[in-house]
Amino acid sequence: MSTWERVADLPLTIEDYALERLQRDVSSAFTRVSTVIRLRGAGTDGVGEDVSYDADDQGALQAAGPALPLAGTWTLASFCEHLAGLDLWPEPPRHPPSVHYRVWAYESAALDLALRQAGRSLQEVVGREARPVRFVVSLRLGKPPTLDPLRSRLDGHPGLRVKIDPTNDWTAELAAAVAATGAVESLDLKGQYKGTVVDVAPDPALYRLLLEAFPDAWLEDPHTGSPEVDALLEPHHDRISWDAPIHSVADIEALPFQPKAVNVKPSRLGGVRSVLTAYDHCDAHGIQMYGGGQFELGPGRGQIQYLASLFHPDGPNDVAPGGYNDPHPAPGLPDPPLPVAAEPTGFRWG
């Protein structure tokens, strides 16, 4: 039985639903907005979180209100089929990836509600035991880049591991200082993003610098299609992992070579079935997995931590508690690994 088949027939009753705005000022230039989807029925509720990045997309959703025809008696599978036939966007999405993010919000809420109505937990239904979650903190070193953002976090949490985003203005001295901390688990090369604020253009000099300074780190999302960069990376295929291109099992199969590891990011894959199918595929093909977040402000963060605890607790999971995303993290944040916090019923991580 596939993991999807274990949850597909869960009964689900929806009477109505509500939308709740979450907001956090991340910096002077960026206010993060997300929306909690709260499905209600049979005396309980289920929650998911829309993590679309454009605040106008979130505002349009919230202004439209709970206008979708979701009420009814379903199974989880029939609800997901029904949802696929609806237009979830009061205004056209401003960024194509957001389409999957919104599907994940509604379907994760439906999974939570179905489990809570059944009085069962996700770990029970999928037949896996939640385990403590090893996590890394994703970090970019500023403009101009300095060691300070990394050092400030390590001073309070010397055992922390990080996923660093190198940029083309790194110097050899900075790379050596970062490497000397011993904290770098992976390098997010941002070579697969196109037309975003985090794109990093392929620079063979940067790749040479990183390959020498970090001989054991994972290399996430390197640029492909540049003959010089491709030649530099060819001996290092065993430590290349993929994130941005992964929206389905078909995308895993279409990678330029058999991957050793992939970032199974639930919101990027969209529906519950797509996510669980990817987990099964990677298990069957010996592909290491880890999870990644989308700057969740609410229950979505706990849900990706829950999934990591079940399917890849020992990976370099980019699912650190949200406080680590703050420019100046507050004292008292937990060190890895995260203890198990699965709630007794539902798809919730306390």
Image: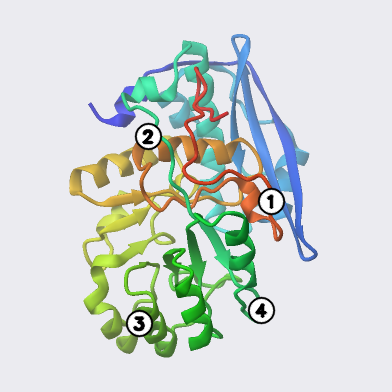
At a point 50% along the width and 67% down the height, the residue shown is 164
Distance of label 2 from label 4 (alpha carbons):
37 Å
- For this orientation, the residue located farthest to the right is 28
Residue depth check, mark 4 versus mark 3: number of the one nearer the observer: 3
Residue 231 point in image, percent of width and height = 26, 85
Label located before the other in sequence (2 or 4): 4
At a point 52% along the width and 22% down the height, the residue shown is 343
Q: Which residue is mark 2?
A: 310
Query: Which three-letter amino acid code belongs to the residue tagged 4?
Result: Lys
Q: Are the two marked residues, 4 and 1, in contact with CB atoms closer than 8 angstroms?
A: no
Other residues around mark 1 within 10 Å, as few (<14) / some (14–19) / many (≥20):
many
Distance of label 4 from label 3 (alpha carbons):
23 Å
Q: Nearer the viewer, residue 299 or 236?
A: 236
The answer to whether residue 79 is seen in the rendering is yes
Query: Which three-letter amino acid code belongs to the residue tagged 1?
Result: Asp
Question: Tag 1, which secondary structure?
Answer: helix
Label located before the other in sequence (4 or 1): 1
Q: Nearer the viewer, residue 180 or 347?
A: 180
Q: Nearer the viewer, residue 292 or 333?
A: 333
- Image check: 224 left or right of 171? left
Query: Which three-letter amino acid code belongs to the residue tagged 2?
Result: Leu
Q: Which residue is mark 1?
A: 57
Residue depth check, mark 4 versus mark 1: number of the one nearer the observer: 4
The quarter in which the N terminus is drawn is: top left
Q: Which residue is mark 4?
A: 143
The answer to whether 264 is drawn above or below residue 129 in the figure is below
